[in-house]
Amino acid sequence: MYKPYKKPVIKASPDIKLPEPRISIFVLFLLKIFGRLYLFLFYGVSKAVLNKEKMLFDAFNRALSGKSRCIIAFRHPNGGEPQLLAWFFLFHLRRCAAKQGVHFSHWPHAIFVYGYDVIRWGGWVARYIMPNVGAMPIYHSKVDIRGMTRIYNTISDGPFPVAIAPEGQVSYSTDSVPRLEPGVIRIGFSVVRHLEKKNINCPVEILPLSIHYRFGSWGKLTIEILLRNIEKFCGYSRREERKLPFGERIRKCRDHILELNETRYNIANTAPLSAEERMEKIANAALETAERKLDLKKEGDFFTRQHRVRQICWDRIYLPGIYKDNLNKMTQIKRSVMDLAAGEAWYISRHQELADLCWYFRGQLPAEDDALHNKIEFIQNLHDLANRTMGGAYANRVSIFPRKVIIKAAPVINLTERINQYNKDKKTTTADTLSDLHKAFLDNIEEMYRTEQG
């Protein structure tokens, strides 16, 4: 019997119009009232504390008084760092600084840079709030002269620091630095040149900022709940299986998920491979599958390819340059074709989402005596791996509430002092400066470890 045609669940949507970034006093007022409730979704009732706060206060003080231009290079391991930092800078930093005798000449704020895809999956809240707190969007895989010019001008004009995640995206790892992109360094040196042309004698500084999560009794309780959820996904929910040692339980679940993905992508392991090597193979196979379905050539490194796939898929779901009026004027057939393309793009992007996490999630199993935050991070990532294997994405990620969030500063990197070297050899100076930034993050991690070990 004939069944009437049903439209796909995923539909092509009109492009998203964003106003020019500005700072709205009304929106800041709303954030002060409702922002903590929003942060509860990421951090519960955890407390944010500062470490090496004098470096942070001094960097803000110089920037706000016009004595420097500041770029905050912040770690982005979990997803909620920009929201937390923005809230802390706006509503807590001034009071914390005053307690140590530091008084800012201007109310503190930081302008965050984010990828355009955030406003697509982030919903109406992100689309309303972010442009009204000055946040600036940028494309990862498109030439965006307007966006880059906006960033350069905002840093050059001051007084607020501009915050950029040099990892380029969520890195899923607090106690390691898997990769850094050189964009933040290149932007900083470009601003130095811009200020020199305008005869403005003002140093450009990069302030490395690390975010560390520590957990308490709630973390110990919920880690078991999350692990049982993973075991349920994998079919290991019998009582005797839950009596196995912690390491054995997570190994069984991880291996089961890896085997399913290897079967899915027809990966034949002819020789014994470590879990990290298997994860890397799955990441490459998933990305190649997405490229093949989009008829893309394999060009560039892993992340260049991944950003390209993500951008194309989003552009088929949110149609660039096509707004609601344009969609309403389309014929039914044309609209349906676009809806089908959007649905196909959504399914293709599931491969990209899996590839993304697999590239990062290649660490060793946590030992029984490992720190609680390391165990929790692994369980969160393992749950996310199961989630993405089933078609989920970052938006479906589950995080355990920390007891404490530590914001740790490192000494600033003065780019103005290096501009002569940069003019002589851009490539080497950029690499050396990026290495110094990487070392600053690693030093913070090592110092946290030594302090906690007593």
Image: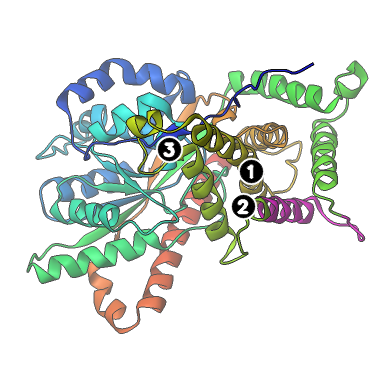
The residue under label 3 is which amino acid type?
A: Val
Using the image, determine if residue 421 lies above or below residue 382.
Answer: below
Relative depth, front residue between 193 and 261: 261
The residue under label 1 is which amino acid type?
A: Ile
Residue 118 bears which disc, if any? Answer: 3
Answer with mark 3 or mark 1, whichever residue precedes in sequence.
3
User: Quarter-wise, where is residue 415 in the image?
Assistant: bottom left
- Identify the residue position indicated by label 2 in the image: 294
Badge 2: residue crowd in 10 Å (few <14, some 14–19, many ≥20): some
- Identify the residue position indicated by label 1 in the image: 348
State the separation of the CA atoms marked 3 and 1. 18 Å
Magenta-highlighted residues: 268-290
Q: How many marks?
A: 3
Badge 3: residue crowd in 10 Å (few <14, some 14–19, many ≥20): few
Q: Residue at x 37, y 25 (%)?
A: 124
- The quadrant the N terminus occupies is top right
Q: Give the x, y percent position of residue 450.
A: 54, 47
Q: Left or right: 426 with respect to 170? A: left
Marks 2 and 1 in Cβ contact (< 8 Å): yes
Relative depth, front residue between 334 and 142: 334
Q: Determine the secondary structure under disc 2.
A: helix
The residue under label 2 is which amino acid type?
A: Leu
Q: Residue at x 59, y 18 (%)?
A: 218
